[in-house]
Amino acid sequence: MLYDTLLVVAVLVVATLPFLPFLHGRVLVPAEVGGLAYLYWIWEVVVIAAFFGYFWTHRGQTVGMLAWRLRLQRPDGSSVTWGDSLLRLGIVAALLAPFGLGDWFIWHHWSPTARKIAMYASLAPLALSYAWIWIDRERLAWHDRWSSTRVVVLPKRAKGAR
């Protein structure tokens, strides 16, 4: 996830370029920039969905998954569809919703300590989804089970094989 996060951040930096001429040195904060900040937020979601959707539907692997020999597939071993990838991303987004909504609309008025506690606590649904892997008989996270996808570990290549 760390590898993919770094790559997604780099892609989002490039995806920000079309918005720069409209900011005039301001930061994209909803209260200060108005509707442009919301449009930018939607644009970020589309870019992230396109990033993961492209890699998952074409190879079943993002760059980070490739490094760790992981592949996303359907239960029968076939490649995921755009619908599968969007459903999976939607479930992860729903699990992350308390984090994003709280940060944008609620916690910015709280004390720094209360904000940190709330932010970490809001990540609990996603953390529980991954922790569920240890309990689940098929070792599936919630977003795997609910989207009918599986992350599998690919075998190591034989030495000298291309």
Image (cartoon, rainbow, N blue to C red):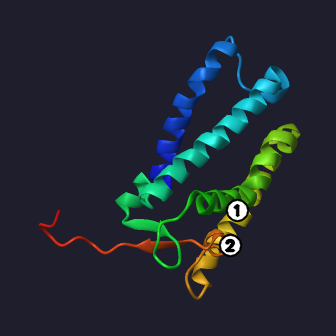
Q: Is residue 58 left or right of residue 147?
A: left
| Type of amino acid under label 2 | Trp
Q: Is residue 141 above or below residue 80?
A: below
Q: Badge 1 is on which residue?
A: 91
Q: Secondary structure at mark 2?
A: helix
- Name which quarter of the figure residue 103 lies in: top right
Discs 2, 1 touching: Cβ within 8 Å: yes
Q: Is residue 78 above or below residue 99?
A: below
Q: Which residue is the extreme one toward the top? A: 24
Q: Is residue 158 left or right of residue 105?
A: left
Res 146 label: 2
| Type of amino acid under label 1 | Ile
Q: x%, y% of residue 1?
A: 50, 56
Please indicate, yes or no, whether residue 117 appears anywhere in the rendered image.
no
Front residue of this view, candidates 123 and 154? 154
Q: x%, y% of residue 17?
A: 57, 23
